[in-house]
Amino acid sequence: MVNNPKALWDDCLHLIRENVTEQQYRTWFEPIVFEQYNDDSRTLLVQVPSMYVYEYLEQYYVGLLSKVLTRCFGQSVQLTYRVVTDKQHGLSQDVEAEEAVGIDLVPASQRANKAPTMLDAAVPQELNPQLDTHKTFQSFIEGDSNKLPRTVGLSIAEHPGKSTFNPFFVFGPSGCGKTHLINAIGIRCKELYPQKRVLYVSARLFQVQFTDAVRQNTVNDFIQFYQTIDVLIVDDIQEWATASKTLDTFFHIFNHLFRNGKQIILASDRPPVDLQGMKDRLLTRFSCGLIAELEQPNVQLCKDILTAKCRRDGLKIPENVIQFIAETANGSVRDLEGVINSLLAYSVVYNSNIDMRLAERIIKRAVKIDNKPLTVDDILDKVCDHYGVSQQHVFSRSRKRDYVLVRQLSMYLAQKYTKMPASRIGQLIGGRDHSTVIHSCTTIEQRLKFDKSFVAEVTSIENSFKLKK
């Protein structure tokens, strides 16, 4: 039995402090709070203040943590993080640490003569590529609208960094399959080259990480980490249009990866020439490989996608219903999936057959039929109405919980369903800056991952818009 596990954790911190710089210790290890140790399951639970701290510890210090835990607690100790996801509401989630091969601690003689560097303390371990394993080439149905990007993507996955398709810039409207394709490239590449460091990251998450690095004075570490990636996949880069400092940092990362033959894959809702606000030096680099457009799927491809999904999920949907959905879903893969999922749910809950009448009912609620674009005002009206809050309160500086929630959710939905940059959304919702919008979107995304009742509320609001999913 382990005696006084809190004292053993303090011993771990003492060892860690001797193997990292003082700044690294204060930034990444001092905020860790000991929660409990279960001797029966040999599980150590510690609390960290954010998902970013957890990810950073797992990327850079998993080896060091494994070594000191083995030294102090013994073999086969499972480290679990309790990640604070919403300080305001006291929300958190538990995440198990990845397994790692232990590293040698820095000898005392070396510590006495020289402060260890980041690389001395912990060599970056194999990282989680953050890929959606359901988005593969097998489930990416080929058609006239996506044949070229799909063929090129498969070639890149088989020969990353060794073709003329670097960088690979894919663009197209919302719901056409961009995210599916770039995930499929990463998954196939990882299957063929398990040793390669493949990473998928959204533009927003990259910007949040960069902002945190600036705040923590660790920008060099941030850049060095991204320069170790073999296949870097960045989604929705149009969101960087007004983020000049983020763009300058990515410029240096891009140059390093490109010069060293690493594969870069970028996705956007518009071609490079239409990315207003970005400097020419970046746009020319985005364009020097291959630019491929993903068009909205035509009716035949929509039918093929629906048929494949029905076959894969064991659904029985009449041919006339599939034809109707394919013709009505506005050429959006997201709309197709949303309609099929809704049909399945209704048929199970109400024990009814999937027929044309049910399909028409679902289409009316789930698909935006008209071409009128959604505005930030539309979103504000619906969210405020749902929560019984006035726009005046949302625009105020009040930190009341209800007002903050409506403000953050409105920013999240505006970012999701309009093409406005974060700075413009912030101006229209109470005169906030772009960093507030980014923080709000991240907060809502984290809550959606574990709060099922909140997911239901957001879905209800989205259905009231008759938005595209």
Image (cartoon, grey):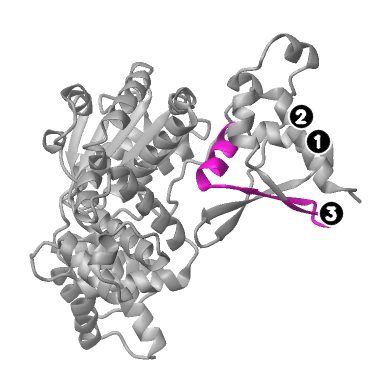
Of 195 and 282, the residue lying toward us:
282
Dividing the picture into quadrants, the one containing residue 102 is top right
Foreground disc of the pair 1, 3: 1
In the image: residue 392, left or right of residue 249: left
- The residues tagged by marks 3 and 2 sit, at their Cα atoms, a distance apart of 22 Å
Please say whether residue 445 is one of the residues in the magenta stretch. Answer: no
In the image: residue 298, left or right of residue 179: left
As drawn, which residue projects farthest toward the left?
A: 371
Please say whether residue 48 is one of the residues in the magenta stretch. Answer: yes
Residue 39: image tag: 3
The residue indicated by pointer 1 is: 11
Dividing the picture into quadrants, the one containing residue 25 is top right
- The residues tagged by marks 1 and 2 sit, at their Cα atoms, a distance apart of 6 Å
Q: Are marks 1 and 2 in contact (CB under 8 Å)?
A: yes
What residue do we see at 26% from left, 28% from top?
Answer: 165
In the image: residue 408, left or right of residue 126: left
Q: Position of residue 100 (x, y in %)?
A: 67, 36
- Secondary element at image label 1: helix
Q: Position of residue 403 (x, y in %)?
A: 35, 65
The residue indicated by pointer 2 is: 15
Q: Residue 189: in sight, yes or no?
A: no
- Secondary element at image label 3: loop
Q: Residue 1: in sight, yes or no?
A: yes
Q: Position of residue 306 (x, y in %)?
A: 27, 67
| Label 3, residues with CA under 10 Å away: few <14, some 14-19, many ≥20 | some
As drawn, which residue projects farthest toward the top?
A: 113
Callout 1, which amino acid? Answer: Asp
In the image: residue 216, left or right of residue 43: left
Q: Is residue 318 above or below residue 89?
A: below
Q: Is residue 195 above or below residue 46?
A: above
Callout 3, which amino acid? Answer: Asp
Please give the range of residues in magenta.
Answer: 35-60
